[in-house]
Image (cartoon, grey):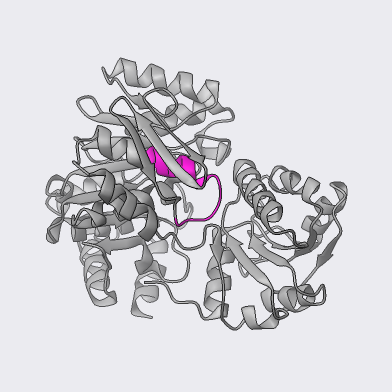
Amino acid sequence: MKTDAILRRILDLHPNKLIDLSLGRIVRLLDDLGRPQDRLPPVIHVAGTNGKGSTIAFMRAILEAADKTVHVYTSPHLVQFRERIRLAGKLVSARRLNKALERCEEVNRGQPITYFELTTAAALLLFSEIRADYLLLEVGLGGRYDATNVIDHPLGSVITPVDLDHQDFLGDNLFKIATEKAGILKAGSKAAIARQHPDAEAAIEDIALGLGIQAQWAGEHFDGYEQAGRFVFQNDEGLMDLPLPALAGPFQIANATLAIGALLHFGTGVSEEQIAAGMKRVQWPGRMMPIRSGKLFDLLPEGSELWIDGGHNPSGGKVLADAMLALDRRAPRPLVMVWATFRNKDARGYIEPFASLGPRVLTLSMNDERASYPAEELAAICAEKGLPATKTDNLAAALTAAAAYGPARFLVCGSLHLIGEFLEANGTTLD
């Protein structure tokens, strides 16, 4: 509760804008804090539109399987803010987090700064105080002007697939958006890049070559695929025969491939055995995550499946629909979706890939009703796509209504904010 009070105060430091992409304010604060960004372990900086969190989860799992200690910074959180910060593998304690936030508040002296900038400064301060072998650092939004882009010499930079998202801040086409994402690339550091749309590839390649970086590209310098129930990774050194990733969904093969390619390219020294162990132990809450117990789960008929996923843009909808199709091919079941999203997201583009699956859809508005798409409008969008949809009032009401369809495959999806609401209401704890 003390953390929440501090975070509310921080929001008031830049009341007119929650997002204001710039580096001047955080650089000023970090200078006043003694430049903690210069006292960090080797940094792997990760930007992109889709798969950032999963790629970081794979890298963390592999490095920890190699007995390395790893700091992690991701966003957003699902239930508690401290989920964003892992210190040497463990979630930061509320006491240590509060101390860092209050220190940054004190040093900032009430000057204008955004919520993400000040909390990122607090995270960097924490990372500088505790020893670790690596820091996995996720970009919040974009790259070039993101608050995390204050690392002058990262060990390496990773760019996951780039897609249309946050066009109001990053540009209205893939070339412009990819140019912003590629702003994390640094001369003298290595880079690993996921497969990209040609426009995004052109933008990233232009910037990499301009900096003198010979980036390693998925599909060109390394690759991965499923074969006979195994995960095969290959690069110039040969093939690795690995277990399938513990994270569900065919798309996780691409995220795992990028993570492995990056760690090998960056010279972390991980072995095939350690990579295999990482595939088995990886966890990433809220993304294609099965739920098997809890208060909301108990509302469903016996024998039901329940999945949750926080993807929210058209490409996220596409990979999730593909994952549901793969599940249906292995074990056919009726699909019932519980869907909510924000007004600034492409709701039509997200739901369209599901049309061929013929799900029943229950829509709702999230707790942040000013920013949430109204449930009735989402239901109308479903109707446009030929999907039967019913407006509901909240998650409990949606799952209660869903239960009327009998045992089925249930999917709660459309927003990480919604997934956070679900986990809290279901009583699911994250560590």
Left or right: residue 365 compared with residue 388 = left
**For residue 408, above or below residue 48:** below
Q: Nearer the viewer, residue 37 or 64?
A: 64
Question: In the image, what residue occupies the spot 78% across and 62% down?
Answer: 334
Instruction: Give the magenta-colored segment's residue range.
Output: 246-258
Q: Quadrant of the N terminus?
A: bottom left
Q: Nearer the viewer, residue 247 or 110?
A: 247
Q: Is residue 249 magenta?
A: yes
Q: Quadrant of the C terminus?
A: bottom left
Q: Is residue 398 magenta?
A: no
| Residue 79 at least partly seen | yes
> Which quadrant of the view contains residue 363?
bottom right
Residue 346, how many percent across, how many down? 68, 44
> Which quadrant of the view contains residue 387?
bottom right
Residue 4, how many percent across, how many down? 40, 74
**For residue 99, above or below residue 204:** below
Question: In the image, what residue occupies the spot 16% across and 47% down?
Answer: 31
Residue 323, how many percent across, how many down? 62, 50
Left or right: residue 153 compared with residue 258 = left
Residue 238, how many percent across, how many down? 32, 29
Left or right: residue 130 compared with residue 194 = left
Q: Nearer the viewer, residue 384 or 70?
A: 70
**For residue 389, above or below residue 272:** below
> Which quadrant of the view contains residue 295?
bottom right
Q: Nearer the viewer, residue 191 or 95?
A: 191
Left or right: residue 351 compared with residue 379 = left
Count every numbered label the image shows and give the total.
Answer: 0
**For residue 42, above or below residue 246:** above
Question: In the image, what residue occupies the spot 86% across and 58% down?
Answer: 388
**Identity of the residue furthest to the front in this view:** 228
| Residue 185 at least partly seen | no
